């Protein structure tokens, strides 16, 4: 029996929301946060901490470590040792700090495009250059181009790779063989892999992601993993995440990087929400995943029946739908701009994620079914106007 109701329409306008700070007639389905309220268990934990009334500096408590350790062991069949874990205020602050610490100016950082656009910012803003290893897109499926990846890793100026696992924006869950091959190449060429696994808990019911560090001793030794409850439990504004690495040398470097940049200390609620999410939020997450993937299926069916000019890229993870608009013959920035202007539907244009995303749009379906139907109607209208 269902315990949670995801059909509740939460008004987010006027709340300082990045996503919803748009014109009155616009429907934002772009940035990756959900329109669902956080789990009651998380809200109750916040209320209890709030009632205490004193919000001074916080130390990391044992319960924070245990929450991560137990969740990854139970959910992802991987044992994270306490001494591997470091608190951080967010995945992107961690990424930026680590890039700055482990590189010298003008070095190259490998990324697999199309990929989360902020990776570009973290690389460029810290004095490095993105080195793209474009993913292969064939028959509606993405895979890694290992021949090209080896060429990029062999570049003596490339000492870091940022892996997105599961992949954003395409929602690909990387298989064990692909991850193992990345690890072997990284070891061969002296490349450290930073694995962003923030979307790992948002998978299709019945399917699991594979932690990069769990694949082999090699993958464990040459990697740094970024994890958080924020994406899966819709608590990004609480600024809480973790970094783990088994390699003692890398661990020290990461610890110094995060502390130097002052992003290794929790606010008064950061640990509270993490422990509540991982210790008490399991059922909420499972029901949310079921709801979101029902939404995804609805998008697939609607697009196939009503908007045959475009296609939905099949995926097993994230609440982000990757739409193939290549048959329109127009760049995604032009298409997204036209749809927003004519219908108010605000989508992410794929070119933001690198050149391989030029003919794609990204649509966030972590919303009520009523909102989804509104969005689909606007999408159909917008595409029709482009094609007429």
Image (cartoon, rainbow, N blue to C red):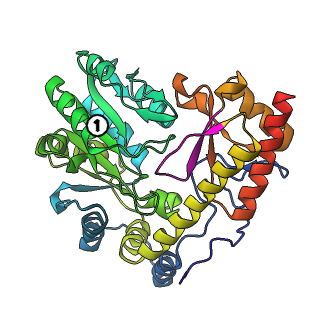
Say which residue label 1 marks: 178
Name the residue rendered at 57%, 61% in the picture.
292
Please tell me which residue lies in front, 263 or 386.
386
Answer with left or right where residue 301 lies relative to residue 242.
Answer: right
Residue at x 64% of width, y 62% of height? 35
Reply yes or no: does residue 231 show up in magenta: no
Residue 335: give x, y in percent of width and height.
73, 30
One can see residue 281 in this view: no
Task: Give the quadrant of residue 83.
Answer: bottom left
Horizontal side of residue 186 vs 265, given as left or right: left
- Give the residues in magenta: 311-324
Q: Residue at x 41, y 65 (%)?
A: 270
Where is residue 348 shown, x and y percent of the image?
Answer: 64, 39
State which quadrant residue 61 falls in.
Answer: bottom left
Q: Position of residue 285 (x, y in %)?
A: 47, 69
Residue sitting nearer the eye, 43 or 132: 132
Q: Is residue 74 visible?
A: yes
Q: Is the residue 255 above or below the residue 278 in the image?
A: above
């Amino acid at each position: 029996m269902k315990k949670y109701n995801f059909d509740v329409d939460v008004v987010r306008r006027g709340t300082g929301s990045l996503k919803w700070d748009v014109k009155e007639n616009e429907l934002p389905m772009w940035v990756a946060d959900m329109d669902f309220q956080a789990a009651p268990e998380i809200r109750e934990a916040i209320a209890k901490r709030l009632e205490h009334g004193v919000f001074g500096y916080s130390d990391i408590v044992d319960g924070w470590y245990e929450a991560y350790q137990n969740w990854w062991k139970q959910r992802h069949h991987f044992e994270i040792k306490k001494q591997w874990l470091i608190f951080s205020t967010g995945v992107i602050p961690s990424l930026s700090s680590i890039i700055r610490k482990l590189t010298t100016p003008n070095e190259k950082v490998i990324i697999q495009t199309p990929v989360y656009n902020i990776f570009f910012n973290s690389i460029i803003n810290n004095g490095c250059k993105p080195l793209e290893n474009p993913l292969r897109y064939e028959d509606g499926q993405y895979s890694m181009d290992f021949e090209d990846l080896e060429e990029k890793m062999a570049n003596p100026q490339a000492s870091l790779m940022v892996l997105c696992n599961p992949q954003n924006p395409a929602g690909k869950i990387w298989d064990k063989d692909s991850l193992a091959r990345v690890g072997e190449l990284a070891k061969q060429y002296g490349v450290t892999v930073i694995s962003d696994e923030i979307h790992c808990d948002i998978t299709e019911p019945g399917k699991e992601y594979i932690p990069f560090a769990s694949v082999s001793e090699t993958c464990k030794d040459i990697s740094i993993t970024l994890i958080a409850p924020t994406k899966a439990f819709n608590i990004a504004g609480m600024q809480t995440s973790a970094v783990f690495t088994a390699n003692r040398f890398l661990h020290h470097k990461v610890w110094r990087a995060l502390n130097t940049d002052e992003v290794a200390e929790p606010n008064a609620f950061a640990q509270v929400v993490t422990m509540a999410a991982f210790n008490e939020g399991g059922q909420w997450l499972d029901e949310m995943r079921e709801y979101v993937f029902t939404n995804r299926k609805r998008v697939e069916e609607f697009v196939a029946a009503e908007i045959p000019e475009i296609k939905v890229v099949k995926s097993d993870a994230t609440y982000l739908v990757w739409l193939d608009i290549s048959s329109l013959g127009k760049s995604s920035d032009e298409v997204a701009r036209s749809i927003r202007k004519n219908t108010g539907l605000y989508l992410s244009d794929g070119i933001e994620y690198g050149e391989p995303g030029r003919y794609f749009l990204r649509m966030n379906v972590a919303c009520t079914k009523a909102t989804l139907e509104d969005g689909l109607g606007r999408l159909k209208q917008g595409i029709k106007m482009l094609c007429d």
